[in-house]
Amino acid sequence: MSKALSNRINSLPVSQTLAMAAKARELKKQGKDIISLSLGEPDFNTPDFIKDAAIEAINQNYNSYTPVDGYVELKEAICTKFKRDNNLDYKPNQIVVSTGAKQSIANIAQVLLNPGDEVLLPAPYWVSYSAIATLCEAKFIEIPSSIDADFKITPEQLEAAITPKTKMVFFNSPNNPSGSIYSEKEYRALAKILENHPQIFILSDEIYEHINYGDKPFSFAAIESMYDRTITVNGLAKAFAMTGWRIGYIGAPDWIAKACTKMQGQITSGANCIAQRAAITAVSATPDKVQYMVDEFKSRRDIVLNLLGKIDGFKLNIPEGAFYVFPDISAFFGKTIRNKDIKNASDFSMLLLEEANVATVTGEAFGAPNCIRMSYAASELQLREAVKRIKEVLS
């Protein structure tokens, strides 16, 4: 019966991050001691002050359908957050709350893209960007970068990738999977190129904004000439350890926000009522409320970089945000390790899973075929053991 499936679903790839996580869980069921560094999920508990707000909402009998675009109190709190953290002025009618930032991104793509439109994806990019573009029958165009360039594209590369069919460009800073952060100067240089192409809209994914280890990330929409063409995406999953609560949101020109509300109204309607009430408390909190998580992530990053740096063949940069390292492991291509031929990053990632019992994700899924992604959202003990196993296999 698989022949009856639509071309739409048949054209859609399986998420490599979720596929690797599923494979790791299956091996665990078989009794293997798998250390999973594949999923982008904080290993902290949701802070108590947020959980208390959810409990209060339950006791106040919040149990009904929510407005499609979110409770007005939450949208007002998000506007305050955007001003406080990003110097962005949005009104509640420009905010749409969704079931996670992934739905926010899908909404935006669905309301802006037509078949044949082109979407520029600076690589490496989050795995779902390309799949979401494909689902819209648009064509995604990768703009490659390298570890030597700190996984950032140049204005010249952006200009060269633009065609009359270009409709959108997706930026993600701090970046998943590389952890790289575009500076204000770098973003303004890219904006100079886009000023000459008024037909292009910008999606700025800022889900990791609070997880940074140096300069505060800069919002693309804060560039005056880009404000009316930029959709800012954010959510609670990463910074507040609320992955399962499923709350994401956008700030956008009001006509785009209305279109996203219309789309969402026919797909899921409003996001979970209890999660939204708790989200009011979360977005109202200043970033220092979750600084303890960021400090711990930075400590783990430094440990992993130090340990991986002692393994010949791992080429590393220093990620300034998120909770991933993204080493270039192309030095292993063409080698045979444990009787396994390593032709590409997928082979290397599978070698680590099968021989070291460590789950990672191939960089091919992120448009960076020379790399693998390793999440350090795990305990220090697990991270040290994981790298120890990897070193033993490769030696």
Image (tube, grey):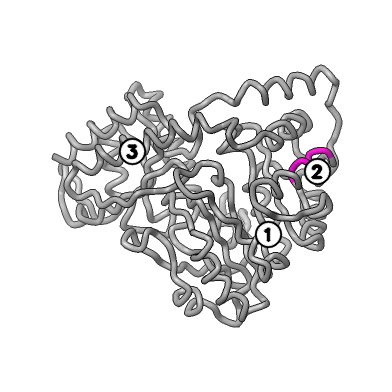
Residue 77 magenta-highlighted: yes
Visible in this render: residue 7? no
* Of the two numbered discs 3 and 1 in the rendering, the one whose residue sits closer to the viewer: 3
- Identity, as a three-letter code, of the amino acid under mark 1: Ile
Q: CA distance from mark 3 to mark 1?
A: 33 Å
Q: Where residue 36 sits: x, y (%)?
A: 39, 33
Which numbered marker is on residue 231?
A: 1
Q: Where residue 189 sits: x, y (%)?
A: 52, 71
The single residue placed furthest to the left in the displayed view is 395
- Would residue 347 appear left or right of 10 to someone viewing this image? left
Residue 47 magenta-highlighted: no
Discs 2, 3 touching: Cβ within 8 Å = no
Magenta-tinted stretch: 73-78
Mark 3 lies on a secondary structure that is helix
Residue drawn at point x = 52 percent, y = 54 percent: 173
Residue nearer the viewer, 107 or 257: 257
- Identity, as a three-letter code, of the amino acid under mark 3: Asp
Residue drawn at point x = 49 percent, y = 74 percent: 158
Mark 1 lies on a secondary structure that is strand
Residue nearer the viewer, 158 or 2: 158
The quadrant in which residue 389 appears is top left
Which numbered marker is on residue 76?
A: 2
Q: Earlier in the sequence, mark 1 or mark 2?
A: 2
- Residue identifier under label 3: 302
Residue drawn at point x = 41 percent, y = 30 percent: 378
- Would residue 229 appear left or right of 308 to someone viewing this image? right
Q: CA distance from mark 2 to mark 3?
A: 38 Å
Q: Where residue 300 sits: x, y (%)?
A: 37, 33
